[in-house]
Amino acid sequence: MPELTVQVARAVAARGPYPLAMRVRDELGELFADAEFAEAFGSRGRPGWSPGQLALVTVLQFAENLTDRAAAHRVRYGMDLKYALGLELDDPGFDASVLSEFRTRLVEHGMEEKVLDLLLTALKDRGLVKAGGKQRTDSTRVLAAVRDLNRLELAGETLRATLEALACAAPDWLTQAVPVREWAERYGPRAHSWHPPASTSKREEMALVYGRDGFALLEAVHAPDAPAWLRELPAVQVLRTMWVQNYHRTVTEAGAEVKRRESKDLPPGRLRLASPYDTDARYGLKQGSWWTGYKIHISESCDDADDQDSASGGQALIPGADGAPPRLITSIATTDATVTDAEMTETVHHMLAGRGLLPAEHFLDSGYASAELIGGMKKNFGVTLVTPVLMNSSPQARAGAGFDRTAFTIDWDKRQAICPRGDPSTWWSPTTLRGTKAIVIKFDKETCRPCPVRDQCTRSKTGGRTLSLQPRELQEVLDHARLQQSDEQWRAKYGTRAGVEGTIHQAVAVTGMRRARYLGLQKTHLEHVFSAAALNLMRLDAWWNGHPLDRTHVSHLARLDLSLAA
């Protein structure tokens, strides 16, 4: 590092709070080495900026929630960044476009996770993150960097985007293929710049006009005399997919008839395009809220000071560092908006295992849990899921009166159930209910009909009592989890999960994580990874400065999560 930069930067920093960028350089040294990015940056070609330096700049950019232009300006004029990057004081920096090119290279070479991997490796070497202990995970929605469009607007904007692409790629061909003057008036303005007709019939008529024009354009592009490469244009591919998803066309001797698909004929949400510009964005629904975009799953460590002391033999991790360890983000997963939390439970654990950071206890909300997942995570990863599960939904359990399933004794070896009055079941049948394996148990109606407590056991007027169980291993896991979550001590322990809500709030407030900056799932995930690295550095900075970490408590949100599971 240039000596003059060190002297001047430290002299200026001594007059106020020590800057984050300088603290990171002092504590972690050269965090991102160029060699780690060699795969994406070859040795041939004109000299460029150091990828390691660009990685650090991008992380600090997200810590301050800056645009590319503002980040380049900070490098040019900010003494703290020159110190962190090891630059001379008169270094002119770089053009803002370099940051965009850097992100594109990372995505093209599958290096979206590289920055967080390197940071966590450095922190593991210093004992600040480790396997075992406690972690917690939760998800939140992410709005795509596109407008929400209804089906009419989506059709018109898709056709407009395709015409724009063809006008740039093959203007001469386009003037011969379509009525340019007429279509320029119809598709020139963007969908959000005008109001659709108020009349339902006129909107339906406009949708059919869009449909016929779209099919006409696709026929022209696929005509034998059209350049073959036009069909490979991304915009043309999007138009074709969008029209297959939204329109029917029937060709008869009388001609072609175009119809708009009814809602029931639309493809599943995971396949349905929501924008012609971001083909990875999907429509999502969670707790009654609709959005267009993605979901992010954030995992972080949440060990208390007592947990850390017992793990380290009572010794502080770093000389002079007392109290609770910093809460550090250990994993970031980004999906489209249709992926459920339960589908990501195993994926998140695979990501943590890949970094050698699997926890002993993982705190999750009920959306991530099922008996199969609780047992599977314990068996495959050695991780105990601390999470509420759905309670027994039988009429007796919901009413809190009568004999629910727990009142029956299950003899798995004899494949028989014993009712509260001591009568055995007469039917035990493995089956499949709603796509999952189950066991149906029935009691003889002749036994149940004269029973004096029949009204407390079944609502059937003529038949006997019926029970539905999961396979033995899963049912025992489920019964144990339900028994645990009814205990006040367990409920107090589960309050640890509530702290992840604060992490999500910090991510949204500091880095703007809830609104995607870029188009596409890969670049959105890259954005989230840089945001996570930025939050980790900010938390480390606070911890290095001796700021105490508030302990989590059982919040109203945690209580609500438990009540919903019940």
Image (cartoon, grey):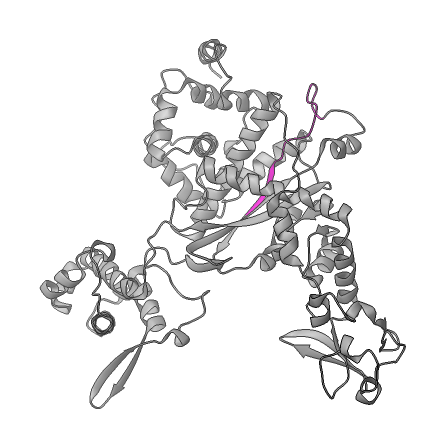
Residue 133 falls in image quadrant: top right
Residue 163 belongs to magenta span: no
The residue sitting at 79% across, 71% down in the picture is 403
Q: How many marks?
A: 0
Q: Is residue 212 left or right of residue 118?
A: left
Is most of the magenta stretch helix, strand or loop? loop
Residue 346 seen anywhere in this rendered image of the structure: no
Quarter of the image that includes the C terminus: bottom right
Task: Give how far across and how far down residue 60 sits, in percent.
Answer: 46, 30
Up-down relation of residue 208 to residue 143 (above or below): below
Q: Residue furthest right?
A: 422
Nearest to the observer: residue 60 or residue 201: 201
Task: Give how far across and how far down residue 465 sits, in percent.
Answer: 77, 80
Q: Is residue 290 left or right of residue 261?
A: right
Q: Is residue 151 left or right of residue 9?
A: left
Task: Give how far across and how far down residue 230 sits, in percent.
Answer: 25, 64
The residue sitting at 66% across, 35% down in the picture is 129
Residue 329 belongs to magenta span: yes
Nearest to the observer: residue 284 or residue 113: 284
Residue 445 seen anywhere in this rendered image of the structure: yes
Q: Which residues are magenta?
A: 317-332
Nearest to the observer: residue 282 or residue 467: 467
The residue sitting at 66% across, 31% down in the picture is 128
Residue 64 falls in image quadrant: top left
Up-down relation of residue 453 to residue 25 (above or below): below
Residue 157 falls in image quadrant: bottom left
The residue sitting at 51% across, 17% down in the picture is 18
